[in-house]
């Protein structure tokens, strides 16, 4: 951090956490020389959240709240009203997973929430391995009619489960800890106990066996101080 003086007034000038660490070799050297330094990769698996190539299609807005536990549940019959890319209708609750798209969604009245809430108005389209049901066939057609068609986008094709472009073969990242990836966001470790699917604005962290995933000490380490989930 630094201060700049402009006509006898002080102005705070902050720098993104990523630029301080990843782009500052001297700081990195100092960190690695500390006797208590342990790289996060030695304690956990890390993976970037989902890069879909078409977030407007694959991440839908829930227009009503399904019953608790229905989203993503295999065999669920409940229908959920959703709004997707140029489309509104009903999708099967079993084809949707609760999602977390943006670190800004974890701000409440200017306070950063370190515990990801279970309730959400966004969901990730994760169709089960079966023929499309409910409103999904219509939604697929809407995606193919879009300009440009969703199914022609390079990353969508790369992620596609064969000819079923609407079903991604990529692993869903719903790991216990969610770290904002982009340097434009405040850095923090958010407890994703609710297992919401993370998109590419987050890095998911899954503690290794033997590392207590809910350990308060781990939470303090990741956040740089005592944790106060709100």
Image: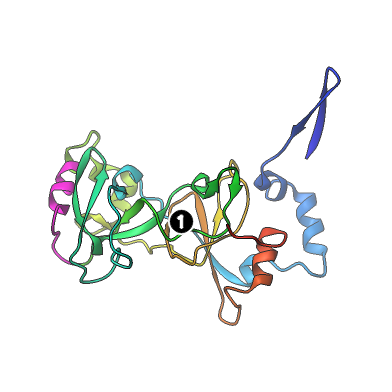
Image quadrant where residue 42 sits: bottom right
Q: Would residue 128 appear left or right of 197 to someone viewing this image? A: left
- Give the percent coordinates (x, y) of residue 134: 13, 56
Of residues 42 and 3, which is closer to you in this image? Answer: 3
- Give the percent coordinates (x, y) of residue 225: 72, 60
- Residue 138 painted magenta: yes
Q: How many numbered marks does the figure carry?
A: 1
Residue under label 1, please give it. Answer: 49
- Where 156 falls versus 177 (above or below)? above
- Residue 114 painted magenta: no
- Give the percent coordinates (x, y) of residue 27: 78, 51
- Where 82 falls versus 11 (above or below)? below
- Give the percent coordinates (x, y) of residue 162: 22, 59
As helix, strand or loop, the secondary structure at mark 1 comes to loop
Range shown magenta: 130-142
- Where 52 falls versus 174 (above or below)? above
């Amino acid at each position: 951090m630094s201060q700049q003086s402009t006509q006898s007034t002080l102005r705070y000038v902050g720098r993104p956490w990523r630029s301080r660490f990843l782009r500052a070799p001297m700081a990195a050297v100092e960190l690695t020389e500390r006797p208590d330094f342990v790289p996060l990769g030695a304690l956990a698996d890390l993976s970037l959240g989902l890069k879909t190539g078409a977030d407007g299609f694959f991440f839908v807005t829930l227009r009503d709240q399904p019953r608790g536990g229905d989203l993503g549940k295999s065999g669920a019959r409940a229908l959920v009203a959703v709004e997707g890319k140029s489309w509104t209708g009903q999708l099967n609750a079993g084809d949707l997973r609760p999602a977390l798209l943006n670190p800004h969604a974890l701000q409440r009245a200017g306070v950063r929430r370190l515990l990801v809430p279970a309730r959400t108005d966004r969901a990730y389209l994760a169709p089960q391995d079966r023929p499309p049901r409910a409103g999904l066939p219509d939604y697929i057609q809407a995606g193919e009619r879009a300009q440009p068609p969703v199914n022609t986008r390079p990353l969508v094709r790369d992620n596609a489960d064969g000819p079923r472009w609407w079903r991604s073969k990529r692993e869903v990242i719903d790991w216990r800890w969610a770290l904002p990836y982009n340097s434009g966001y405040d850095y923090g470790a958010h407890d994703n106990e609710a297992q919401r699917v993370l998109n590419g604005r987050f890095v998911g962290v899954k503690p290794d066996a033997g590392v207590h995933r809910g350990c308060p000490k781990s939470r303090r380490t990741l956040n740089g101080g005592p944790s106060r989930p709100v």
